[in-house]
Image (cartoon, coloured by chain):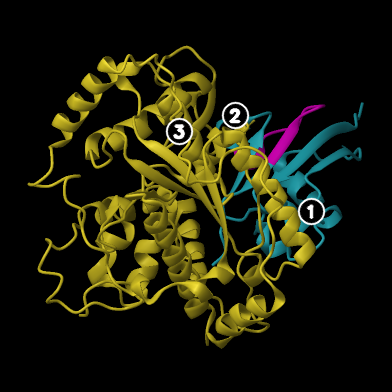
Amino acid sequence: SKISVVHCFYFRGGAELLFDGVKKHQVTLPCQPEPWDIRNLLKWIKQNLLKERPELFMQGESVRPGILVLINDADWELMGELDYKLQDQDNVLFISTLHGG
Amino acid sequence: DRPCPRSHPRTCMKCGQGTAALVIRVGDPFCRDCFREYFVHKFRAMLGKNRVIFPGEKVLLALSGGPASSAMVRQVQEGLSREAAKRLRFVPSLVYVEEGAVCRQSPEQREQTLARMETLLQATGFPYHVIHLEEVLELPPSILQPGPERSGTSGPSGPSYKEAVDSFIQQQRQEGDSGTSLPGHSTQDTPAGPPATPRLPNAAQTQELLRIFEAAGTATAREELLQMLRTHLIVQTARNKGYTKVMTGESLTRVAIKLLTNLSLGRGAFLAVDTGFTDQRHGDVMVVRPMRDYTAKEIAFYNHFYSIPTVTVPPLFTKRREKPSIHLLTERFLLGLQEEFPSTISTVYRTGEKLSPEPAKASSESQRCLLCLCGLD
């Protein structure tokens, strides 16, 4: 059976500026046949949360270089990055380390 | 399930027990505790190895509100509070340069940023100074020259580092040091109690500042102008208040980007002063970069784990349809390359480490650039 999952996304380090300045988003992802991995999550974020300039957050199917991704306070590199399958109540945190000029 | 392409083992490589919280360098998983130890140790090792900060010396920490300088202040706090034998012994104060005018912030937004920074500064307990970028309009011409090198602090005429530390420890014992860790507040500096509400500069000054910045023809020139003016303000503050050292928070990532950016700007001859651990071009005030061995990722994770407060501000303004600055392009280039080749940034950094500043020469004879104080080449 299909389960909807609730996640908190946080944006920090300037990344929140792309999301209307809102740092914390609590969402329920809709049920769908495809699994909710980070790859699909990013697509969803781009379509539903990103208010402007998607190229400042994403590059291709991943996040822009310089944006860190933490899943439940751990480095996504430990979890399989884009392939990580989201679990109910997972927190995903995006921290931008970019400066601009 | 096919194997995850970039998935690292989940056990800490250092202690072999803890669950890994992050991967540093290329593929080294660390648990939170080992990472903290690594992070804190690196700061003390950096200062200990270089031995340029003398006991009791007044050091001005430049705080931008950003992650690196905030982490730096935390390391100073940690270092000052350790048990007597190993603790840091200098006397810190903080300086914050408010740049809202050139970030196109409204007066209300600037006040808000100031209030948040004020809270942050006060919470440290260190004396602090808040200055506005508009104050460059009041800088004396003396800022365009190096100040006289002070005798008695280091070098052949003063005590060696070891002698200075030994005599400091002895003095403390004689004075019956009770082991209080935080230095007393100098009466010249702003005390860390509730101060008057910071006032913004008047509109005319802000306009004049903006006029100067708008006159810069490119985003690159504007960026360089900002960095130069900010440095002048900080150095002048240090000079006015008797600080002999300034600490700035450039991270490894920032240093690598600056290295390549400055090469592109034609500053190849000055890479060592622009990015090295010490920068002595100002003469009486030495700039020190203790965060230059920390990657932006390490700093971001440390700040997250230990709730280091930061204040994010928008970047320097850009004009519509203007080409991006060399700074921005270099950042994009390096970070992009780093994705596929994870040793890119550290390689640039380590190559930069091999550069050393030119040996000190008779500075009265050599001609210097008024703006950056480096020798004309």
Give the distance between the C-alpha atoms of the residues marked 3 and 2, in whole angstroms: 14 Å
Locate residue B248 relative to residue B214 in the image: left or right. Answer: left
> Which residues, given as a range, are shown in magenta?
A79-93
Q: Which of marks 3 and 2 is nearer the N terminus?
A: 3
Q: Quadrant of residue B105?
A: bottom right
Q: In which quarter of the image is the N terminus of chain B?
A: top right
Note whether A28 is above or below A58 in the view shown: above
Vertical placement of residue B214 versus B29, above or below: below
**Is residue B344 placed above or below B205 in the rendered structure?**
above
Q: Which amino acid does label 1 sit on?
A: Gly
Q: How far apart are marks 1 and 2 (CA)?
A: 22 Å
Q: Which residue is drawn at 50% across and 34% down?
A: B74
Q: Which of B358 and A33 is in front in this view?
A: B358
Mark 1 touching mark 2, by CB under 8 A? no
Residue linked to disc 1: A21
Task: Name the colour assigned to chain A in the rendering.
Answer: cyan
Q: Mark 2 lies on which chain?
A: B
Badge 1 and badge 3 in a common chain: no
The residue pinned by badge 3 equals B75
Q: Where is residue B230 in the image (x, y as percent from the top left)?
A: 48, 65
